[in-house]
Amino acid sequence: MRIAVAILTLAYPLLVYFGLSRFEPRWLALLLAGMALLRAIATREKVWLAAAGGAVLLAAASGLGNQLLPLKLYPVLVSVVLFVVFFTSLFHPPSVIERLARLHEPDLPPAGVAYTRRVTEVWCAFFVCNGSIALVTALWASSAAWALYNGLISYVLMGCLFAGEWLVRRRVKARFAHD
């Protein structure tokens, strides 16, 4: 079920964009509400339950007013939730990236902990920028531009950040291996 929710979440901007030509926003709101309910069922983590609640509120606002804007705000909500998860982990260690790193390297050295903290900070900055652009596209861009950014460009940027971090990590690990 988590995989289905992840796929729907990734495809959400494109589903909304293509659905607009066939359905009113109030009917597309059912898609968002359904995704939120699936996420609530698939996870028991408080932050994702809160995100699902936010998505249901956006869906309700869209459905009641038959408005598109609340549906376009969902990617903003996702960026905000991810920012909060990553940011709070900086003050309540281990950081998100450290937790992920320890899955492969349980005895992470102090330099690795410092590095994962820095990467968590970079992801926080990414989520702020991504959420800001998602908000701008929701408020002032065409539906096509919104779908293009939120359904493609943001994922390409995320992939570039993953790839760039992987390359940097290899260099950092090599440098520490020689010290």
Image: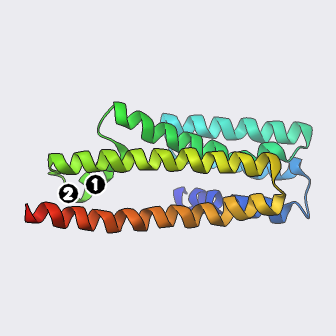
What percent of the width, then of the height, locates residue 26?
88, 47
What percent of the width, then of the height, locates residue 110?
16, 45
Q: Is residue 161 left or right of residue 138?
A: left
Q: Measured along the vertical axis of the image, is residue 177 above or below residue 27?
A: below
Q: Identity of the amino acid at label 2?
A: Glu
Residue identifier under label 1: 101
In this view, the residue farthest toward the top is 91
What percent of the width, then of the height, locates residue 80?
58, 40
Q: Is residue 91 left or right of residue 49?
A: left
Determine the residue positioned at 64% across, 45% down: 132
Q: Is residue 150 left or right of residue 157?
A: right
Quadrant in which the C terminus is drawn:
bottom left
Q: Identity of the amino acid at label 1?
A: Ala
In this view, the residue farthest toward the left is 179
The kind of secondary structure element at disc 1 is helix
Few, some or many residues within 10 Å of mark 1 (<14, 14–19, 20+): some
Few, some or many residues within 10 Å of mark 2 (<14, 14–19, 20+): few
Determine the residue positioned at 56% across, 44% down: 128
| Front one among 46 and 114 | 114
Q: Is residue 41 left or right of residue 150?
A: left
- Tell me if label 2 and label 1 are in contact, CB under 8 Å: yes
> Label 2 vs label 1: CA separation?
6 Å
Residue identifier under label 2: 105
Hey, which quadrant is residue 1 in on the image?
bottom right
